[in-house]
Amino acid sequence: MILKLDFQSEIPIYQQICDQIVFWISTGALKPGERLPTVRSLAEEAGINSMTVSKAYQQLKAEGYLVTERRNGVSVSEKFQKRGELSAEDQRALVLLISRARIAGVSKEEFLALCEKFYDVKTDDLERADCRNEFSNTDSP
Amino acid sequence: MSLMMNLVMLGCTYPILFFLYFFMKLEIGDKKKTLLGIAVPEEFRQEPQVQEICRLFRRDMKRGLAVMIVFPAVFFWAPWFTWYITGYLLWVYLMMAVEFVPMIRYGEQLKTLKRRMGWGGWNSGTEVDFSIALQPVHVVKKWLLALLFFLSLPPVLWELIFRKSGAGTWDYVVILTAMAAVVWCFCVMLVRLDRQKSELISRDGEVNLAFNRSKKRLRAVAWTWTAALSVVLVWVTEFTVHDQLGGMAGYLAAVIIYAVVVCALVLRCEWKILGLRKKMMTTLESYDSDEEHWYFGALLYYNPNDRHFMVENRVGTGYTVNVGTTLGKISMALTAALMAGCLIWVPFVVGREEFTPIGLELEGGTLRSLHTGTEYEIDGSDIASVKLLEELPEISRKNGTGMNNLAKGRYRISGYGTGFLCLNPQNETFLLVETDEGTVYLFSDETDEGTLEVYEELLQEYGT
């Protein structure tokens, strides 16, 4: 798993980290219970401030994607809340995204095709360059 | 400075010229997957424009090499050592320039071509492999570095604490501190090496992990050995300055052996890393995304968002500093200042030594020999004997200055043991002074007449 950080992007670095971890969890690249790098080692490897990584982890913990255990450090949550629906915040983000797609001239069919493509992405597809790039070019919700 | 010393200096420097040429030439060869440090995808390497840039680069490098091979003719036969050392320093700097200028020029051309043609450009930004972050590779043994650090200290402390008097004490302190500082620098560098940014050569985390682990291990071993050898050199220096080992010739041989072994260790390690990278590398994506932070072809790394102080060199091998960090800026400025300073300071100091006349006088009952930064004073009542020699005995330098027209410092004097010299070896008359304590001095004035004059004054005054 290659974490990509774009310093030129308007999306904050901590948010980029959050987005990619959520993406990996959704595709199965990061499995429930799997350990994540420590704040210090990820910050050292990426050459960024450890506060940035800490902020990303805190947010993911608050959203229930990650848990902290005394022995294992930070790992992917074993149990996600499967509400079967998007949160109000995510729905707002989706509405905004659809609006942007509509303005950009993306037809409903094309939009749904894209949704289908990304919804079906699995771990094996992650190494495909087009998939990675399309993800990294997508704005944060 | 003798012809032999001049030859030794040239002999030690010529290999650097060929090594530089050899390593720079690798930048367009098959050993590396980048071209002049630029991530050009494999399928475009044979494009005519790319081949033309490579051809021009090779041509310029060859021309530069040819000029540098004959350049020493400008200074080798110079009558003054100041001229020699200035020419020598210029030669070393030009040696680097003739390799780096084509690298910058053609690297920039290749970068522009790549952008124009849309080669690569998979993505931009910094990439981090989660596998490496999950299992950080730390290979440097800190206890070993601490041990080397402490082993390098005793000679310095010995000179500082126990040697409070006697000629050249502060010289020894400075020399030994400078040599021990090399060990300390290696130790700091090794600690930094452990935190170096990992290189992503594959999309497979296991491959990246294996490569970075091997790379760090190879470098840690090579540089730890280098630090250990530097400790040995500090001790060899300590014993040499106190006459416990051979004279200057023996010491010079030890330094040459040290330099050769260190070069062999480092080159072997870097060669292995090059081979390993070539074998394991499956993608240039990470190189490509990082390219926007490389300037002057791929020579200078500037990324203020990256907190790493040292990064892997794109061109050649080893590390370079990230000029985007404060520490990187300071170290780059210091390096530039040091290089410029050397070119001014070294000829100035050598010139002052070489062209300042030696002074020998008897004043107020004290015999005084003067030269820049050196002053030997012998009270007339302490003089046991004075001899006028009409031929310079065979001398061998222990430490001090040795030039065609100046011999200064501690020397072994054939037939008289070890003594202190301040004379012009080209003269024909010398004053051999022995004190009541048994210390031997061999002096001369700038001219033979001056020496003779002082000798006669001594005879008149003390009748020794």
Image (spheres, helix red, strand yellow):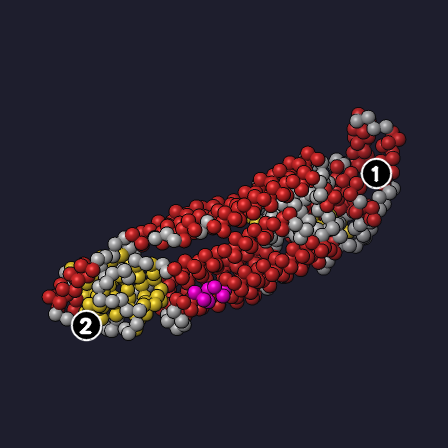
Q: Position of residue B299 (x, y in %)?
A: 58, 45
Mark pair 1, 2: CA separation: 104 Å
For image coordinates 79% across by 54% down, the residue present is: A33
Q: Quadrant of residue B450?
A: bottom left
Secondary structure mostly seen in the magenta stretch: helix
Q: Position of residue B310 (x, y in %)?
A: 58, 50
Between B299 and A121, the one nearer to me in the picture = B299
Q: Amino acid under label 1?
A: Leu
Q: Is residue B448 left or right of residue A40?
A: left
* The one of B375 and A75 positioned closer to us in this rendering: B375
State the image quarter where residue B437 is shown: bottom left
Vertical position of residue A92 compared to residue B309: above or below? above
Q: Which mark is residue A86?
A: 1
Q: For the point 65% across and 57% down, which residue is it?
A: B273
Residue extending farthest left = B460
Chain of the residue that carries numbered disc 1 in the rendered image: A
Q: Is residue A112 above or below residue B374?
A: above
Task: Examine the image and state in which quarter residue B288 appears.
Answer: top right
Q: Give the mark toward the camera: 1 or 2.
A: 2
- Label ID, residue B384: 2
* First to last magenta residue range: B252-258
The reply to whether residue B162 is in sight is yes
Amino acid at the residue labelled 2:
Ala
Tag 1 secondary structure: loop
Is label 1 in contact with label 2 (beta carbons under 8 Å)? no
The crowding category of the residue bearing disc 2, from other C-alpha atoms within 10 Å (few below 14, some 14 to 19, many at least 20), is: some
Give the residue drawn at x 71%, y 39%: B119
Which of the chains bears the disc numbered 2? B
**Judging from the image, what secondary structure is the residue with disc 2 in?**
strand
